[in-house]
Image: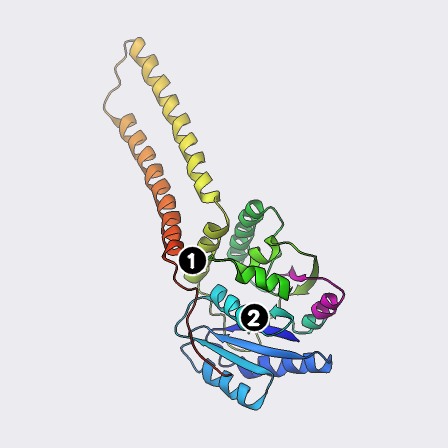
Amino acid sequence: MLSVVIPAYNEEEMIPITVSVIDKTLSEADITHELLFVNDGSKDSTWEKITEAASSNTNVKGVCFSRNFGKESAIFAGISEAQGECCVVIDCDLQHPPEKIVEMYRLWEQGYEIVEGVKRSRGKESGLHRFAAKSFYSIMSESAGFDMSRASDFKLIDRKAMNVLLNMNEKNAFFRALSSWIGFKSIQVEYDVREREAGVSKWSTKSLIKYALTNIASFSSAPMQLVTIMGLIVFVVGLGATVEALVTFFEGKAQEGFTTVIILQCFTGSFIMLGLGVIGFYISKIYEEVKGRPRYIIDKTTY
């Protein structure tokens, strides 16, 4: 059986459409399946729509969080609750083409344990958003050691890979990277990102920035290395200022005022504070990990 894990946050308009499209696609392909919706603490009637769908369609199941825990937690909850021999993670907004699930499943039947959905095109987005995404994936690719420039959460993973991911105790796990990092026999399937069928994106600029920072910290030490680079820059600038001060001293020329000293102090102090901020961010993530709190809390299910 194939489990389709569908995280949902304030997607009341999309639930009936998503159920209809995916269920029809898999039924026509004669694939035994379950549609597992994970309600990530939605504030609208998303959960009511899920329960309605589950009552009228035996292929639909629902899990409801006690509050909003984030998309990554919703994905891992879905994987944990999935009953299939493999599972596909897909967005509720259908920007991931459902017909590609059939192609992924056929490749799994051929022996592939991870089928990666990679973006051929990113769809409509602003230039700033495209630049930010490119920068983010550049950092992640460098840290992970494999290309993530076209990576997405849209992928199929075998039960073996599912178990490995579930045995990882990281609280701030980045599914998109970890599912590739674990290895296994993999293949890629290209797709074009589509426009939403209904509703609007629930990702604000603030939430995207927070998402990016959290995942960079959970999978990369790049910001820590940036502190080291800034330290070297300050050292070089300070060394130059020191040489200048020594030369003027031996020439018998007194420097007027404290302008140079003030500039150096401000320059150095800003880098120190920035460095402490980055270190503090990592310490906060370590603190979250050692507390040992669960990734999510399930309030209720439809089964």
Q: Which residue is pictured at 47% across the width and 66% down the height?
A: 73
Residue position marked by numbered label 1 in the rendering: 210
Q: Quadrant of the N terminus?
A: bottom right
Query: Is 287 left or right of 56, judged from the image as shown?
Result: left
- Label 1 vs label 2: CA separation? 19 Å
Judged from this view, the residue extending furthest toward the bottom is: 56
Amino acid type of disc 2? Answer: Asp
Answer above or below: position of 98 versus 115: below
- Graded by Cα atoms within 10 Å as few (under 14), some (14 to 19) or many (20 or more), the crowding at tag 2 reads some
Residue range (magenta): 103-122
Q: How many marks?
A: 2
Judged from this view, the residue extending furthest toward the top is: 251
Q: Secondary structure at mark 1?
A: helix
* Relative image position of residue 148 (x, y in whole percent): 60, 53
Residue position marked by numbered label 2 in the rendering: 91
Answer above or below: position of 32 versus 185: below
Q: Are marks 1 and 2 in contact (CB under 8 Å)?
A: no
Amino acid type of disc 1? Answer: Lys
Judged from this view, the residue extending furthest toward the left is: 257
Q: Is residue 116 magenta?
A: yes
Res 153 → quadrant:
bottom right
Residue 96 shows in the view: no
Figure coloring: rainbow
Q: Secondary structure at mark 2?
A: loop
Q: Is residue 32 magenta?
A: no
- Graded by Cα atoms within 10 Å as few (under 14), some (14 to 19) or many (20 or more), the crowding at tag 1 reads few
* Relative image position of residue 294 (x, y in whole percent): 41, 64
Q: Which residue is pictured at 61% across the width and 79% down the height?
A: 34
